[in-house]
Image: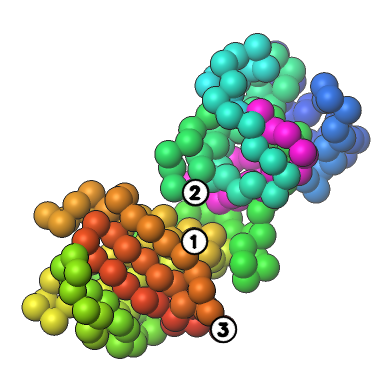
Amino acid sequence: MNQSRAVLWTILISFVAVTVPGGFVMAQDRASAENLKPPRDGGVRRWQVTVAEAGIFAVPGEAAKRVMTLGEGAVLQNRGCSENAGQVWCDIRSLSGNVRGYALAAHLKPAKGPDGIVATGTDDSRVRAGKRDFDAEAVISCAQEQGQALGKCNAAAARGVGGDATVVVTFQNGFARKLYFVHGEFVKASATMSGVGTDMDWRLENKIHHVRVDDQRFELPDRFVFGE
């Protein structure tokens, strides 16, 4: 075992709390070696910021360029963590994926989803939706063209845990589009000739997800998307 790896395991496995710059104390239950793996290797899917101001840096290291500062409670995607200069840094993304950088593991804890579950491993809802392995089907309100009145579409939901889900909506003409939810939030749709799926607006109002993607609009009951 080389010296760098030995330092990492000393930080990760020790049950003794580790004090880092800024005075924050991180214990084993906050960030175990298992949690720090990327989701593809069984790590947590998402982190939650635990401090008032957590710096997000372009590369690991507090001397690096600061991309942004996030407040307590912010939820981030986990891309795996590693040791750098005696500190553990996590490669993170925003839920939508448009913010990328590195945060100190000491400023993070595993994030519970809206269902109270700390999701680990990769979400399988997208794969299941592709196989038409759905948990629920419903008729929802939708509009395919800009300015069109809301009509009806068939929808089918493949649910994951931690607030992850993939919904396939089929319009009256047979055109279908996938809608992706992460941690209870709509983040994007599948790319089609209508657009790449990231020109969107979303809000949750009276337990209905109001979604616009490109020129299309959807209204999806929260209970249909995520279940009880």
Which residue appears at 88% of the width and 28% of the height? Answer: 23
Q: Which mark is residue 185?
A: 1
Q: Which residue is mark 2?
A: 95
Query: Quick one: label 2, few (<14), some, or many (20+) residues within 10 Å?
Result: some
Residue 73 in percent (x, y) is at 70, 49
Q: Is residue 223 visible?
A: yes
Determine the residue positioned at 22% across, 84% down.
151
Describe residue 186's horizontal placement relative to residue 1 as left or right: left
Of the two numbered discs 2 and 1 on the same chain, state the one appearing first in sequence: 2
- Residue visible at 37% across and 66% down in the picture: 211
When the figure is inspected, residue 68 is found, relative to residue 2, above or below; the finding is below
Q: Residue at x 21, y 61 (%)?
A: 215
Disc 1 packing (10 Å; few <14; some 14–19; many ≥20): some
Mark 2 touching mark 1, by CB under 8 A?
yes
Along the line of sight, the residue nearer the viewer: 70 or 112: 70
What amino acid does circle 3 point to? Glu
Q: Nearer the viewer, mark 3 or mark 1?
A: 1
Q: Which residues are magenta?
A: 33-55
- 32 left or right, relative to 134: right
Taking depth in this image into account, of 128 and 34 the one nearest to the observer is 128
Q: Secondary structure at mark 1?
A: strand
Counting residues from the start of the chain, the first of labels 3 and 2 encountered is 2
Q: Which corner quadrant holds the N terminus?
A: top right
> Residue 10: where, in percent of width, then height?
79, 27
